[in-house]
Amino acid sequence: MNNENQITLLNELIETSRDGVEGFKKCAEDAQDPKLKLYFQDRANNCEEVVRTLSEEVRKCGGEPDKSGTMKGAFHRMWIDFKTALTEKDNLAVLEECEKAEDVALAAYQDALKEELPENLRSLIAQQLEGVKRNHDRVRQLRDEAENDPSKV
């Protein structure tokens, strides 16, 4: 994979991670439970760190890091606003939408690892994929808990 392709791939992951930052912040705003708000804010902060790391890799490849998220991510956050407005910012609704966004992030990282990458980037992306998996699994667990017993979340 040449530098231009690496830059493109890394910038796509930056866009996905920026969507994660904004999505988790939106979920923190919309969640009713204080512990859930803190969890989402922590995840937003983690995604910001991922953006910084990926941006540094883009610069090492001679490129300019992407400065925005995706249109799809922006529309998804608007959908979260709409759905939570209808459900009075219900924690379950927030978690369901957060899980959908984490599905997208998971797919983006898995697709990136299908590419031919230098070992340093493969290692970095694989490490970040593990974080995405943990986010996804935790959000799913919280969603299941809210589904089964809304008083727990």
Image (cartoon, rainbow, N blue to C red):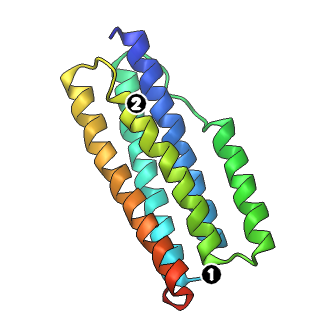
On screen, residue 148 above or below 66: below
Q: Amino acid at mark 2?
A: Asp
- At x 38%, y 50%, the residue is 132
**130 displayed left or right of 59:** left
Nearest to the eye among marks 2 and 1: give it.
2
- At x 33%, y 58%, the residue is 134
On screen, residue 149 above or below 1: below
Tell me the SS state at disc 2. helix
Q: Which residue is mark 2?
A: 111
Taking depth in this image into account, of 104 and 30 the one nearest to the observer is: 104
Which quadrant of the structure image shows residue 2? top left
Q: Residue furthest top?
A: 2
Taking depth in this image into account, of 8 and 56 the one nearest to the observer is: 8
Q: Which residue is mark 1?
A: 32
Q: Residues within 10 Å of mark 1 (few under 14, many from 20)?
A: some
Q: x and y percent of residue 124 in the render?
A: 26, 36
Tell me the SS state at disc 1. loop
Q: Residue furthest left?
A: 119
